[in-house]
Amino acid sequence: MKLANKIILALSCALLFCSCLGDLNTTPMNETDFTSENAYQNESSYLNALAYINGYYMLVGQTDPGENDLGFSDSGQSEFFRQWINLNEMSCDALKCVWGDSYLSELQNNSWSSTNDACVAVYTRAVKAIALVNEFLLQTEDDKIRSRGQEKILQTIAGYRAEARFHRAMFFYILMDEFGNPPFPMPENIGGDNPEQIQRADLFKWLEEELLDLVSDESAMPEKGAVPYPRPTKGSCWALLSRMYLNAEVYTGTARWEDCKKASKKVIDMGYKIHTPYADLFRQDNSESGAAEEEFIFAVAYDRVSTQSWGGSTTFNSASLNEDANKAIGAEFGFSKVNAENWAGYHVPAAYVEYFNLQEVEWNNSSNTFGYNRQTSDQRAFFTNLGCTETFSPSSQATGWLCWKWHGLNHDGSYAHDESTAGNWKLSSTDMPVFRLAEMYLNYAEADARMNNGTVTDGLAKGYVKELRERAGVSASTPAIITTDWFLEERAREFMWEGHRRVDLIRFGKFTSSDFPWAYKGGIENGSAQLSDHLKIYPLISSDLSVNKNLKQNPGYEQSK
């Protein structure tokens, strides 16, 4: 079992702190829950509390993964990480769904409102997570530690506090990226007044200062390797800064390319590695095999035993294939199926798959499971068009490409889903990356191109691109002159369904442009739509607006309160 998840097993007696943030209160869910009054009499409870914060990316409640604390009828759809990916991929050209749920249709037609379930899940869980961190910071101040007679653990607690602050920064970053001008709850709001609203540029400034403090020499934030994977370290902080600086012009109106290069290089120099083969990054045992620990700078750790969830990698394993494709791909590897289940929902439009330059593409050829030559194609491509028509339709399972980037195999080719394991064999144990070294490589290189009239000139940047392209088996097709525009396509290949696409398209000026169509953009089948610029951020959710009068809805959504 994963070491970090042994800690999270403590969730059976985890802390769920009382806090007051309008209708986003977090309160003990049963009589046996700890409260802030008695939680910290046992020194081990501090680590349990940190584990709960760390687990909030993927856990939906305190007991069964089928029961959630947001009141969603489908608990898997209430999970933060699943819906965060949906907001960033299904609103664009990379991910489509045929299930017909109204919130999914709204995402892929770019017609969402302030009650969209994905928006509600991401916003609510982010604000709740921030409240958990704020309460943790209040309860771990030096004076309170001393008052409990626990002076000997002050240094340890300082490290825990730094990790908690990173998580708070991560959730604030997501609110800034997705919702623009969110509420800004701080510890003083616990049990007090509703938080004020913060503007996007001001939140960027606060995040930058917070993260730079966490990476300073005086900080107690753990160095790389000082805490077990996948807990955050200074590398995680620099990686978040790298992503922020890459998109700083989107967030603040001012480009920060040089800062992006510097932050990326800080991470690169820490000793992370580009793991080969690429496929191992998304296998069921990606943490046990060493693939994730080598390349992932921060990740959400899933485990079918200790961090059970119907979201995250379980969704991407199960939702992406129909029964025929599941069986056919499984047979290619000597198994009856490649995934534990086949929900037959997620699809990839053909135009997106074209970025991978697949070789010898065929449609409706039952003798070719994949529909192309996998051996000679980009090794980041995990597709099948078995039994599908080329043009995606939201009303048909047999449409467009299917993807099996996440699947049920271990790195040695064995099948991970043991059906004799009662109750949890259908769930996935694949860790999901939030930041990985490949992103730092491409952030560095793109920033260099933008600093040099749209062309990569830095020898290190060229080397980073070469290393990634060699891993993908396509180094021979790398352009001699690497331009800024090339990075949008390369990032589509490298980071498919990892949550990058929306902000990448916004940064490149493509998200709302009619010159960049995709299937059902704006609800139009051929996607030749000009979207309103207000769609570059999501609306604040209506339930929070109704209870916190300090909040003003984002422009363009005023009628959706």
Image (cartoon, grey):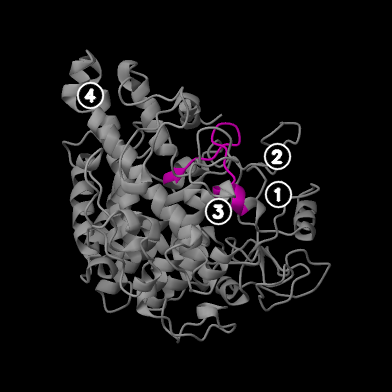
Q: Are marks 4 and 1 in contact (CB under 8 Å)?
A: no
Element type where label 3 sits in the image: helix
**First-in-chain label (3 vs 4):** 4
**First-in-chain label (3 vs 2):** 3
Task: Give how far across and how far down residue 406 sits, in percent.
Answer: 61, 52
Find the magenta span and give its range. 298-316
Three-letter amino acid code at the position of disc 1: Asn
Return the residue at label 2.
417
Q: Is residue 230 visible?
A: no
At x 22%, y 12%, the residue is 149
Instruction: Judge left or right: residue 77 versus residue 402.
Output: left
Return the residue at label 4.
155
Element type where label 2 sits in the image: loop
Q: Nearer the viewer, mark 3 or mark 2?
A: 2
Three-letter amino acid code at the position of disc 3: Tyr
- The quarter of the picture where residue 42 lies is top left
Task: Give how far across and how far down residue 369 sits, in percent.
Answer: 77, 63
Separation (CA) of disc 2 from disc 4: 42 Å
Return the residue at label 1.
339
Separation (CA) of disc 3 from disc 1: 19 Å
Q: Is residue 337 visible?
A: yes
Three-letter amino acid code at the position of disc 4: Gln
From this view, report whether residue 472 is shown above or below residue 34.
below
At x 46%, y 53%, the residue is 121
**Number of residues whose C-alpha sits closer than 10 Å to that of mark 4, classed few (under 14), some (14–19) or many (20 or more):** few
